Amino acid sequence: MTTDIRLAFGHPEERAEASAGGDPRDRLSLRDHIVEADIGAFQQERGQKQRLRFNIVVEVVPQSAPIDDDVDRILSYDRIAEAIAHELAAERLNLLETLAERVAERILHSPQAMRVFVRVEKLDRGPGALGVEIVRSRAAVPTQATADDGSETALHPVVAYLDNATIAAPDLARRLDALAARGLPVILTVGLPEFPRAVTGHRPTQRRIDLLAIEQNAWALAARDDRCVVVGTRTEIDWAMKHGKMIVWAPSKIVLDTPDGPKAASGDGLALALWLAETMAATELVVHGPVSVPAGSRVPVVTA
């Protein structure tokens, strides 16, 4: 409990370190950045500038090539301060929660940014600081589709989990037709295949074997219907969603590269599907087959 309290009131960098995955991550931080803004839901706050203090930590993709002391190859500190200034200038807001969400989303638009911790505090509302702290991951930012007029709309897909019997069933095409008829991007997910796989007794290697076995099952599904496109990265998912493709998810790349990824067993295909649905801000997870539906999800779960 003492550790939890210390982390709750410590700098966001401490939370970032405590919740990091096994792989080391580079971090960029902005500490005690104070600006004045007109913000607040109460009448007495309107038309009055008050001080806001920002503490932000951004986990970034480690550089795969030398940066050569070139500022254009990194996520600049200025981008963090600019994200704050841009969102404060865009419109007057009532809630710190809204401001924190928008600042986090803007920072995560930078390709290097993977995860961001944003703490915003009001300094003039009482004897202490009143604030909010959020954590957002790049994968949780909805894909944006650009219309002809330049406006952007968030794409919220339908994620479907198909068990092995459904994949092999003669009515597979009908099920896919029903999913496509919703008029939303469709991401299909699968679990482990029925054939045996290697068992190592070593958790890291077993995790990779299980994920690769699921990917074999994904390719088996794609072979059943020409509409299916197997993809393995967030960039590929975004492109396929924008172009109306029926996606089959190969999970290895995204799961292994995400520091705060799914905590369930790597062979639990339904748990992986639920995690993907939550990170993609899906409208719902549609489960095909007699499997136990998980409870407590942030995404509605329905059975087909």
Image: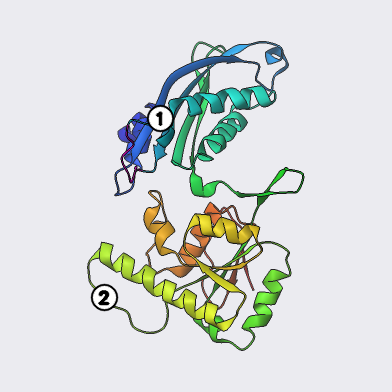
Is residue 45 inside the magenta stretch?
A: no
Q: Return the residue found at the far bottom.
A: 170
Question: From where the camera sits, is residue 7 visible?
Answer: no
The majority secondary structure of the magenta stretch comes to loop
Is residue 65 inside the magenta stretch?
A: yes
Name the kind of residue labelled 1 in the image: Val
Q: Nearer the viewer, residue 32 or 78?
A: 78
- The vertical placement of 266 against 7, above or below, is below
- The vertical placement of 248 against 193, above or below, is above
Residue drawn at (51%, 25%) of the image: 120
Residue 123 locus on image (x, y percent):
52, 14
Residue drawn at (32%, 44%) of the image: 65
Residue drawn at (49%, 58%) of the image: 275
Which quadrant does the C terminus fall into? Answer: bottom right
* Left or right: 302 as drawn, with respect to 18: right
Residue 233 locus on image (x, y percent):
47, 58
For marks 1 and 2, the one nearer the N-term is: 1
Name the kind of residue labelled 2 in the image: Val
Q: Nearer the viewer, residue 107 or 43?
A: 107
Residue 135 locus on image (x, y percent):
47, 38
Classed neighbour count for the residue bearing mark 2: other residues with Cα under 10 Å, few (<14), some (14–19), many (≥20): few
Mark 1 in CB contact with mark 2 (< 8 angstroms): no
Q: Tell me the mark number nearer the camera, choosing from 1 and 2.
A: 1
Q: Which mark is residue 71?
A: 1
Question: From where the camera sits, is residue 194 visible?
Answer: yes
Q: Nearer the viewer, residue 87 or 130?
A: 87
Q: Which residue is mark 2?
A: 199
Residue 43 locus on image (x, y percent):
73, 16
Q: Which residues are magenta?
A: 62-68
- The vertical placement of 254 against 84, above or below, is below
